[in-house]
Every structure is written in structure tokens, then in C-alpha cells.
Image (cartoon, rainbow, N blue to C red):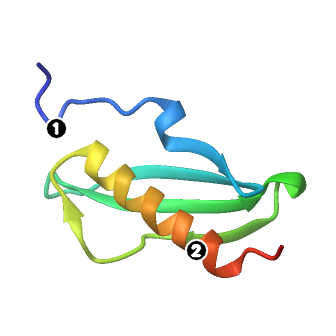
Amino acid sequence: MKNAESANVDEEDRCFHYRGYLLMCEPARLMSGGFRAHAVVVKHDFIGSTMASSAPSNVFFLSRRAAVEHAKDWASQWVDAHWAT
């Protein structure tokens, strides 16, 4: 079993399509050894046009996976709040 620090997060877990947007969620390594969540939201049919890019909060995580999950939650909520039907 891998420990939380060394566990890799697959690209499929970090990049996915949601309601016509491409969500790219990355763990940003901190000097302290932890991770910060980072997300980029791009309109899927208009690649190159970034809609939102953020480190969603000042919350820090012990694992890459936890940071990615937080970024995914934030990015999905951003799309839900800005998505036009």
C-alpha cells in the first residue's frame, strides 16, 4: 500500500469533462511538504479560453489525491454556478 505522500493521481482523475467544460485539477506541491488544490476550467468547445483558474482556498492537504478531490469539487461547483443551459 502506498502512503498518502507518494500516491500518484492518474490523469483521468485530474482531467475530465463536465457539462461542456474541461476541468483540469492539479495538486500544487508546497515547500512544507503538503499540497494545495489548483483547478483550471476551460470551455470544452473553445480550448485555449480559460474560464477560471484558482487555488480554491487556503486549505492545505497531506496527499495529492485529497488536493485533487478538493479541486474537482471546487471546479464542478464553479461550472454549476456559471453554466448556461
Where the N terminus falls, by quadrant?
A: top left
Mark 1 surroundings: few (<14), some (14-19) or many (≥20) residues within 10 A: some
State the SS at label 1: loop
Name the residue that disc number 1 marks.
5
- How far across and how far down the image is residue 54, in percent? 51, 71
Viewer-nearest residue: 25 or 80: 80
Q: Is residue 66 left or right of residue 20?
A: left
| Mark 2 vs 1, N-terminal side | 1
Q: Is residue 7 left or right of residue 55?
A: left
Q: Residue at x 24, y 30 (%)?
A: 7
Q: Quadrant of residue 6?
A: top left
Viewer-nearest residue: 40 or 13: 13
Mark 2 surroundings: few (<14), some (14-19) or many (≥20) residues within 10 A: some
Residue positioned most to the front: 85
- How far across and how far down the image is residue 4, in percent? 15, 37
Question: What's the amino acid at mark 2?
Answer: Trp
- Confirm whether residue 28 shows in the render: no
Viewer-nearest residue: 37 or 80: 80
Q: Is residue 51 left or right of residue 59?
A: right
Q: Residue at x 61, y 43 (%)?
A: 16
- How far across and how far down the image is residue 33, in percent? 15, 51
Residue positioned most to the top: 1
Viewer-nearest residue: 20 or 65: 20
Q: Is residue 53 above or below residue 21?
A: below
Q: Quadrant of residue 76?
A: bottom right
Determine the CA span between mark 2 and mark 1.
28 Å
Residue positioned most to the bottom: 81
Q: Residue at x 53, y 71 (%)?
A: 77
- Confirm whether residue 11 shows in the render: yes
Q: Nearer the viewer, mark 2 or mark 1?
A: 2
Name the residue that disc number 2 marks.
78
Question: What's the amino acid at mark 1?
Answer: Glu
